[in-house]
Image: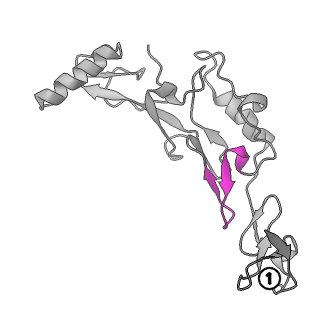
Amino acid sequence: MFAVSQSKCPTDGTGRECSGKGQCVLPEEQDAIPSCLCPFGTAGIFCEHSCPVGTKEDVDAIRADHNINKFRNSRYREDTDGKIDGEVCAGHGVCDRKGACVCQDNWFGERCQYMCPWNNDKQHCSGNGTCVYIPTVQEFPYCVCDRYNTLVKDPVMAAANAKTCEEKGLAVWPNGWCSYCELKSFSCTVFVACSSF
């Protein structure tokens, strides 16, 4: 329970309590320290940070980045998949006390505006890989698909991998690897959604 307090709250560099944005509150405990209750879109000890907010351009980029040719029903929809435009951290993260977004799993970027690819069932990497976001490799998150080597030196591991390939219905390539990756090689850097081919 909070009550408005006349006690001194944290001030910004110009001496304004809660940066002139938030409300000074004091928990009912007698020895509690006054704090700022920051309004929507701000954070920090005295509400000094602005939280990143999703934009219409973020929505357009997510919709354009999807592989609609492969997954026709996978296009992001704000009415069913969550509002992005105008939402703190694009609606897919929380703003920390320093004004930075901490994104949900499979969401990345300064505003949590980048989403890992998903299939028609909204499974990221089709449930067959790991989402990676390295902006120096690609602007958007991508999938590194699960892969298994049937020619490893350990015979128990090789047999287990071969069994996994068979159970998943994946062909083993001449180099001993099987994967959901579109490229038939070990060095498969994947920018697809790890569906079966």
The relative height of residue 48 versus residue 117 in the rendered view (above or below) is below
The image shows residue 24 at horizontal and vertical percentages of 83, 76
The image shows residue 104 at horizontal and vertical percentages of 60, 46
Q: Residue at 80%, 82% (x, y): give it.
A: 9
Instruction: Give, as a three-letter code, the residue at label 1.
Output: Cys
On screen, residue 43 versus residue 142, left or right, reads right
On screen, residue 83 versus residue 183, left or right, reads right
Camera-side residue of 67 and 89: 89
Camera-side residue of 147 and 45: 45
Q: Quadrant of the C terminus?
A: top left
- Residue 150 found in image quarter: top left
- Residue 18 found in image quarter: bottom right
The relative height of residue 124 versus residue 99 in the rendered view (above or below) is above
Q: For mark 1, does the 10 Å Cα neighbourhood hold few (<14), some (14 to 19), or many (20 or more) residues?
A: many
Residue on which the image places disc 1: 9
Q: Secondary structure at mark 1?
A: loop
Q: Provide the residue span drawn in magenta.
A: 89-103
On screen, residue 158 versus residue 171, left or right, reads left
The relative height of residue 3 versus residue 110 in the rendered view (above or below) is below
Count of all numbered marks drawn on residues in the image: 1
The image shows residue 54 at horizontal and vertical percentages of 75, 46
On screen, residue 158 versus residue 70, left or right, reads left
Q: Quadrant of the N terminus?
A: bottom right
Say if the magenta span includes residue 97. Answer: yes
The image shows residue 103 at horizontal and vertical percentages of 61, 49
Q: Residue at 54%, 46% (x, y): give it.
A: 135
